[in-house]
Image: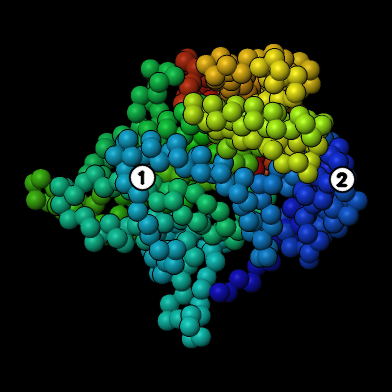
Amino acid sequence: MVASLRLPSLTSLLFPATTRYPAALRRTVCLRNRPASGFASGTAASTDAHRLRSKQAVTPRSQDFNAWYLDVIASAELADHGPVRGTMVIRPYGYAIWEAIQEYLNVKFKETGHSNMYFPQFIPYSFIEKEASHVEGFSPELALVTVGGGSELEEKLVVRPTSETIVNHMFTQWIHSYRDLPLMINQWVNVTRWEMRTKPFIRTLEFLWQEGHTAHATPEEAEKEVSSPYLLCAVLQAKQMIEIYTRFAFEQTAIPVIGGRKSKLETFAGADKTYTIEAMMGDRKALQAGTSHNLGQNFSRAFGTQFQDENGERQHVWQTSWAVSTRFVGGIIMTHGDDTGLMLPPKIAPIQVVIVPIWKKETEKTGVLSAASSVKEVLQAAGVRAKLDDTSERTAGWKFNFWEMKGVPIRIEIGPRDVSSNCVVVSRRDIPGKAGKVFGISMEPSTLVAYVKEKLDEIQSSLLEKAVSFRDSNIVDVNSYEELKVAISSGKWARGPWSASDSDEQRVKEETGATIRCFPFEQTQGIKTCLMTGNRAEEVAIFAKSY
């Protein structure tokens, strides 16, 4: 494989362990001291190596958000760095979060008539060249294979950056008549894009995603695939797949995304329109968390993907594509995490409840473990994802810190006195200290299950409410370019009327570092004046710095 570009070093995943934990835990979460090849480079790599050797505490979010993010990924055992620069190894706990994302979305895709399948990851370069704007948009990010089996290939191959081209090649062979439409498929695969600046889960050389592809007989049908009544506002039309993504973000991950349409400059290469969900992270940067594209007939014309309509005439199909990726995991970290570590919404948490038995004397051990095991079985039987940490090598305090770092929503503590009184102590991850701890909760199965489920729902709602409040308090309505610049310079999002040109949009990006994240589906009524030109504006746009 030919890959002459050099990615930044991956050593920002050479994170320190945290000194707030006992020495045994520091040894557990500390990475192997191997050659730097990671997500940072130059002095950043040296700094990270120093931090690793000195075993500093997890960096406070307010002090250095990026360092905090990398520390949490490391200490919560979500990912490690791969041997190839810009890649990452997703560890079991991190992958379990991705599996929860897959599980929810797979059901929704199938409910809306989509079937899973798989396309090869090697794509002939000639396919990429067929759609002009597509090759122009992706050319800098392509990874190419030129040698196979020891011989030079007749045609170089592209390692899948996205699949519109190969999908169309196959659609051309499968679609012949209007009776073959609509054709709606999805695949869960890896993708390779040769990124110059990488960040684990957010932007890596290789990542995991789902990508849906559909073909339709009419543009109205294609638009319907990405358009349906938006439940939050009956007047507006939002996009079907974006609606699924939006519901997932709100209901499962407690991330209050804003759905909308991308500007022309931000539209996917080869699409007529791109729709997006944008999330505000803890550092107030925007994260594009999911996209849906109306491809029009751009790819079907390039590949000759046609069908015979009911009148016997040949027509090109109308298409859509849509995707979310493992960057959603990064979004969950950066939306909810705190200085202690991860804070996972219960619906997406691999472990919803961790049970920590506590004893001092050997004579107390059997009774405490028996009670703890019974509690675990009761919760699991009720559908709660519960884990019993019955390891004897670690202290209770060590376990408290460890599972808090991993973001488990609820901790149940059981000691000898609790066994005697048939009660447990329940601690919430989202409320630190004594305020989040409740004593004397009965072990009686129906009472305990009802209490735990109620608290899990409260945590889910609380995390969403907190994220909504944070988002809304950091969006500023602006009516002039000067006001926009002030808002962006203060780290906030700017929302204002916009009808200016592409060159004006580029000017904003060059002068402020912000881009149009979207034209929100929810728009205010009435005549507006463009903040840049003073001309009439039909819509407001949201500007922000982004990942």
Along the line of sight, the residue nearer the viewer: 146 or 113: 113
Q: What element carries label 2?
A: helix
The three-letter amino acid code for the residue at tag 1 is Thr
Residue 537 lies, in percent from the top left, at 50, 25
Which disc, if any, is residue 23? Answer: 2
Residue 470 appears in the figure: no
Looking at the image, which is closer to me, 510 or 255? 255
The circle drawn on residue 186 is: none
Report the side of 521 relative to 34 (left or right).
Answer: left
Q: Is mark 1 on a helix, strand or loop?
A: strand
Q: Residue furthest front?
A: 363
Foreground mark, 2 or 1? Answer: 2
Mark 2 / mark 1, whichever is N-terminal: 2
Residue at position x 68%, y 25% in the image = 412
Image quadrant where residue 496 sits = top right
Q: Which residue is drawn at 26% across and 37% down?
A: 221
* Left or right, 313 with reference to 435: left
Disc 2 marks a residue whose amino acid type is: Ala
Above or below, 86 relative to 182: below
Residue with the mark numbered 1:
320
Q: Percent x, y for residue 206?
A: 57, 57
- Residue projecting furthest to the left: 311
From the image, which quarter does the N terminus lie in? Answer: bottom right
Q: Which colour scheme is used?
A: rainbow
User: Would you say residue 34 is visible in this rendering?
Assistant: yes
Residue 240 drawn above or below residue 472: below
